[in-house]
Amino acid sequence: MKPHLIIKLHTTQNVPRLAHWEEIIDDRSEVRKELVPAIDTILREKYKLDFISSQNYKPKDKTWSPKELESGLNRVYRLILLTNKKIPQDLIEEIRLLPNVAYADQGQVITSRLPDQKLVGAQSLSSKYQDLSIYLKEAHFITKGHPDIKIAVLDTGIETNHREFAGNFSSPKDFVNIINGAQQFVGDYLEMDEIPDDLVGHGTHVAGIITARGNRMPIGVAPDCTVLPIKVLGALKNKGMLVGAGLIDDIDAGIKYAVDQGADVINMSLGIKHSGGGLPHKDVINYALTNNVCVVAASGNDGTKDKYYPGAIDGVIAVGATTSSGTVAPFSTFGGHVSVSAPGVNIYSAYLNNGYARSSGTSQASPFVSGTIGLLKSYAKERGKSLRNSSVASILQQTSDKLTTRFKDEKAGFGRINVYDALKMLRYNL
């Protein structure tokens, strides 16, 4: 993707009909080179930048739905430069001052540190359940999930042919299509397609926690739910460390795609810091929440009181990490936005080439919570009911095991999840 601007307008008045950016990558027959006169003038006449205009989001159906309109997704545009010139900050500031502009920013590659993964041999399985004090074995006597409940994994992709996965995947998609700075990347960072291959292992490890069959590793939290593999991150080497990296706009596209494909839960074991106006992902996260999709995200791994997005957005379930002894992991980022905690130290899960690895991080804690929500929604569905996001949040808050004397702790949130108690409370309520 060439340098581009993301612009949200207050109204679509006088905006021409535009194709979605994904449609014009290969087919330029419907390309338009204008948005609105005031913005066109700033770009072309003052800064001598030629561009093409496109919709940043694609409507789920032929026309925009009321929920898409409510979230303002129809008013977000992607202006793609026709050359690789740098976009001046002064240009962005001038556009932001225009009366019809809600926000404007430059499309940028963001990074999210990936936890170190230590390749290990298959462990001895006297039991398919790892003792993580979340009472998963007991919970599975109630339900192991339902195939109609879909958990989207937005990550570095998934090795879908791994022996731990039983083919319960649906609607795969690879949104990573980076050109600028591509020489820094490892693995697959080009050619947006329907093949979300994982070449760094992070997404496969996360998916294993959710859906592993328990062949040579502990069984996943929700092995009978359907997983949507959505690749939104490539990977690059940065100062000797492997970090997930992708265009923030493509992560947003992945969120909307997950919602439109019927996801019930979205797991995002990633997060970015942010400063300045306009929270990243806010519009499309709002779209997910209004469609009753639970969004679960890692809180971060810097061990400070900080905010990473989307975890810090209202309505998102931000997850901290706990140790095997039941304390908050020292690396777990904390703050009032942290909802609950889950195991996140030395977690054994699937890895590349049919292998296995141990890894630590809030990236590993997040899928334990996503899987738990998948079980809750599955149990409700098995009884002909549906579960609202507010009910899910309430159940997790009231059934998590407290790690301190506080009802809600700054580091642990409402406590470490207790999958069995959560399902028992739901069963009682239903």
Image (tube, rainbow, N blue to C red):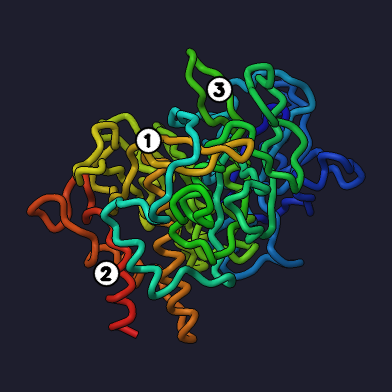
Quarter residue 306 falls in: top left
Residue drawn 35% across the image and 61% down it = 136
Q: Which sits in the foreground, 394 or 165?
A: 165
Disc ID at residue 50: none
| Residue occupying the point 40% across, 33% down | 273
Q: Is 286 displayed left or right of 257 in the figure?
A: left
Picture layout, residue 25 above or below residue 194: above
Label drawn at residue 360: 1
Location of residue 212 with respect to 396 vertically, above or below: above
Marks 2, 3: nearer the viewer: 2
Q: Position of residue 368 (x, y in %)?
A: 39, 53
Q: Nearer the viewer, residue 77 or 337?
A: 337
Extreme residue toward the right, this view: 29
The circle on residue 421 is 2
The amino acid type found where label 2 is placed reads Asp
Q: Amino acid at mark 3?
A: Asp
Task: Give coordinates of residue 233: x percent, y percent.
Answer: 59, 36
Spot occupied by residue 414 in the image (x, y as percentages of width and height): 22, 56
